[in-house]
Image (cartoon, grey):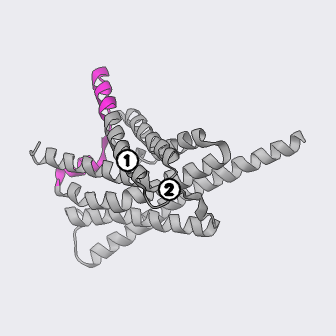
Amino acid sequence: MGTDVSVTDFQVHLQTAGAVVSIVAGSLVVASLAITLGSSLLSSLGLSSTAPGPRAFISAMQFVGFAVAIAAFLQLSDDWGLIRWRLPTLRDIGWMVGGLVVLFGVLFGLSALISLLGVSTAESSIVSTGRESPAYLLYLVPVTIFLVGPTEELIFRGIVQGTIRRAYGPVVGVVGASLVFASIHLPSLLGDGQFTTLAIIFTLGALLGVLYELTDNILVPIVVHGLFNAVQFVVQYATQTGML
């Protein structure tokens, strides 16, 4: 009997890891292809990919690739029930508002603590690009609301967290998905303090994961994630243009 249990456990570990690696790696590969396709399209139209609008279009293509990968994964696995969702209720809307407030509160609190401790943080490549071309940040607002929030939440909270949760429970699901979520942001971080910034991203991702578990509705973290990013882009734009 002990051998049977061991084999069963091994199969669960293998299937869970395989599903997580498949959706994350598959999403990155398809996103890369989508970016290449988008760049080729801009080139054929004679448009410079360094201009704010075209550059935002290239960013959007990454998440179009994510959407294709999500649909392919769910179709091939025939596991559409993995994503828990429903039309938002008034209670869900309350969670959206509260979740957004909590995320900003935690971000400000962590930023203040890091500043107090004198610890450095890495800079996002988006902020770096926005400094050179502030209009790029405004173009990203609809991109993050309609593409980034939905696709990243469907991948990391819906599929990754859902898969890990199914095997090991909600706590491990939230922690595991948040670790994966933070790790894929590493290539976009510039300068020193990358691990500090990854810790912040992990914390915010975990809060989105908890929000998903509390509401049982993927639309809640999707909306919170999209609006959270959008507000930051608007603030960054106002900062870079001297409005703040």
Which mark sits nearer the N-terminus, 1 or 2?
A: 1
Report the span colored magenta. 108-134
Q: Position of residue 101 (x, y in %)?
A: 32, 40
Q: Position of residue 26 (x, y in %)?
A: 53, 61
Q: CA distance from mark 1 to mark 2?
A: 24 Å
Is residue 192 shown to the viewer in this render? no
| Residue drawn 32% across the image and 29% down it | 109
Q: Quadrant of residue 33?
A: bottom left
| Residue drawn 87% across the image and 42% down it | 3
Q: Is residue 107 above or below residue 154?
A: above
Q: Is residue 2 magenta?
A: no
- In which quadrant will I find the N terminus? top right
Q: Quadrant of residue 19?
A: bottom right
Q: Is residue 216 left or right of residue 101?
A: right
Mark 1 or 2, closer to the camera: 1
Q: Between residue 154 and residue 181, name the one nearer to us.
A: 154
Q: Position of residue 27 (x, y in %)?
A: 49, 60
SS majority, magenta: helix
Q: Between residue 91 and residue 205, name the one nearer to us.
A: 91
| Residue drawn 43% across the image and 37% down it | 203
Q: Which residue type carries mark 1?
A: Gly
Q: Which residue is mark 1?
A: 94
Is residue 170 shown to the viewer in this render? yes
The tag on residue 155 is 2
Q: Is residue 121 magenta?
A: yes
- Residue found farthest to the top: 117
Q: Which residue type carries mark 2?
A: Ile
